[in-house]
Amino acid sequence: MSDSLLQITVEHGPVLPADVKASLEQIYDAVPTVTCACDRLGQCCELTDEEAADDWATMYPLYAVEYLNIVDHVRENFSKEEQKRLLSFDEERPLRCPFLTKVGGCSIHPVRPLACRTYGVISQEGVIETRDRLEGEVPAIWLRHFVKNESCTVCPHTEIEESEKVDDHAECMATFSYDRRLLDLEKSFDGLDDDRRDLLIKASGKYRISRWTWGGFNTLWRKPISWLKSNLVGILDRAALAE
């Protein structure tokens, strides 16, 4: 392969196959829709210095199939200038989500990833009720992770629009059902070409990176092959969130 960028720079045709996209949308559809009445929109999409030091990240975890879905959306709906800015963005852990608009909106809201869709959906009372309801039915370590993770994303400003979905959604979060389904999708398609796959295996011993950030995936998918040959090992050694 030449040093030209990967196929996602081509200006026609989607990267993500239609059947994979349909399966991804089925996963997203299970998440209850919420509205936000926050007086400072977008504050959950920016990190304080303390949050960054505590290993928080914007739009994380982002799965590879979600990354490719967003790439398609950016290529189909953004100006050439914005495409260049967003698809060359390579910060692994920015303090501000690159898709956050100046007025606090989300510029990719229709294709926002699971991490963003599930933020603020479950109340603190719902977290505890779900833990108690599932105790003894799922591994205790899963429930501990669920309580820790969801307690950090409770938001007093969200209002549930699809309350009938909440209990099933909470169970999916507690049992990591969404995550397992996303990982299964990546086994059928992760979009990485053979040259980049070989470099990834040599650099890390991994066949794929399933979860990373927007900037991290841009580095792996979009940097020229010659650049990756010289820099990928160092990038992965310094990466805090590549999984």
Image (spheres, grey):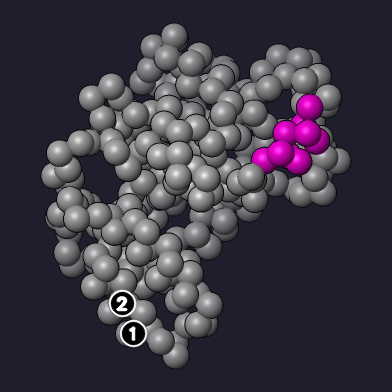
Magenta region = 231-239
In the rendered image, the residue lying farthest to the bottom is: 136
Q: Are marks 1 and 2 in contact (CB under 8 Å)?
A: yes
Amino acid type at image mark 2: Ile
Taking 168 as reference, is 49 above or below it? above
In the rendered image, the residue lying farthest to the front is: 50
Viewer-proximal residue among 68 and 209? 209
- Helix, strand or loop for disc 1: helix
Quadrant the N terminus occupies: top right
Instruction: Measuring from the top left, give residue 107's x and y in whole percent.
Output: 32, 28
Q: Kindly identify which numbered label has been placed on residue 128.
A: 2
Mark 1 lies on residue: 132
Write the residue at 33% across / 85% down. Answer: 132
Write the residue at 23% across / 73% down. Answer: 125
Taking 222 as reference, is 69 above or below it? below
- Helix, strand or loop for disc 2: helix
Amino acid type at image mark 1: Asp
